Image (cartoon, rainbow, N blue to C red):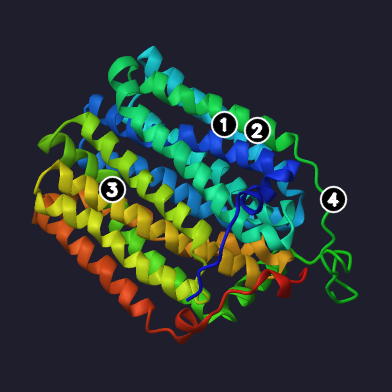
Amino acid sequence: MVLTQSSAGRLASPLRSRPYRLLLIGQTVSGFGDAITPIALAFAVLQLGGSATQLGLVVAAYAGAKVATVLAGGLIGDRLPRGLVMRGSAAASALSQAVIAISLIGGWSGVALLGMIGLVNGCVSALGGPSGQAMTRETVPAANLAAAISLRRLASNAAMIAGYGAAGVLVAAWGPGWSIAVDAVTFAVAAICFALIRLPARTPAARPVPADHPLPADRPSLLADLRGGAVEVLRHPWLWALIAQALVYHLFYGGAQGVLGPIVVKAEYSEAAWGWALAVLMLGFVAGGLVTLRFRPSRGLFTGTLFLGLTACFPAALAVKAGLAVVLAGAFLHGLGLEIFSVNWDLSIQQNVAADKLARVYSIDQVGSFLARPIGLVLTGPVGEAVGYSRWLGIVAAVMLGSVLLALLVPGVRRLRRIPPAQLIPR
């Protein structure tokens, strides 16, 4: 492993790029609102008389729609200007969140309505996600890519800390409706930022197409584009192995945080305590981001996967019911480990995947990772009620740790090395 020195000038260098600054501001502002909505939505469902199972269904509606749509987002992101895709997605998200807020404020909302709007919101959000991830590489020189990824994630996580910390206060003071209205405003601001980004047009390489094909030779079919993205994923064993690990992670952990977390913490402590736990979780993300600004191991994916094992600490802390301090410590370690992994994972993809396939690879990553999340969200409520919340949270922690250990057995995960900036070439 190698520790590389950093200086203020070097860390600031990605910020010299105006497109990167606008991307950073847009994603940071929307991240603040996104942190408020899950908490506000959970308590909105509970205030409307919803059960743990109904809360799981509402959250699953959003997650399921996102999984179903994200592949389209990847295809669009590799065909159209990514800035256009991102501002359209942000504008549509602002509108759908505004509808949720108005329904709650006006008193005519219901659990079914929240679920239906969640479907719409999940779709429009998924369309812009892959483009947002792939666009980082377009906005900075190759030598600044690692710092740009770390700074982008650091800013987003800091914004989410503020959002989680404010969520409990906002819900208690103003109610879920006005809290979700804040998210609608942040999406509108993000759409403006993305609209101001100016980048040279991408010119992906032409691909051969049969002469009788209805599309021009430089415009392959959507199916061919999707197949190309899948082939790119399958040719990297470390890539598909960790996507499989993420599928298991989200199948079990999604419901532990999204459904059981707020119920257990509210019962043991208070509504505000769940907001504090998520804020400390995000503080762990920020700490992990700060670590990655200086800690640049040569085998970053291996090191990051080792740290990923810390994510089991949060559900384990919820399971043992040893006090709020233990819950907060588990949340911090979860965020720390996940962020160190995520930065190295993101950089591994950016450095080893061709630029014209990035959005598709990111979309396949999201589909594979989150495919089972809606199932977990739906089943967590009834399974937790059947076996006991604490016992199920303990099982979740064990499965998460076991999946990380299995991923470490893959040679590519252990051997993939970071490419020094001097060796990076445009793809």
- The location of residue 180, given as percent across then percent down, is 43, 26
Amino acid type assigned to the residue bearing label 3 in the image: Gln
Find the distance from the CA under tag 1 to the CA under tag 2.
Answer: 6 Å
Residue under label 4: 200
Q: Secondary structure at mark 2?
A: helix
Find the distance from the CA under tag 4 to the CA under tag 2.
Answer: 19 Å
Find the distance from the CA under tag 3 to the CA under tag 2.
Answer: 29 Å
What residue lies at 31% left-to-right and 55% top-to-bottom? 334
Q: Secondary structure at mark 1?
A: helix
Find the distance from the CA under tag 4 to the CA under tag 1.
Answer: 25 Å
Q: Quadrant of residue 213?
A: bottom right
Q: Quick check: marks 3 and 1 in contact, CB under 8 Å?
A: no
Mark 4 vs mark 2, foreground winner is 4
Pick out the residue farthest to the top.
Answer: 106
Amino acid type assigned to the residue bearing label 2 in the image: Ala
Q: Of 304 and 258, which appears nearest the observer?
A: 304
Amino acid type assigned to the residue bearing label 1 in the image: Phe
Residue under label 3: 257
Residue under label 2: 191
Residue under label 1: 187
Q: Secondary structure at mark 3?
A: helix
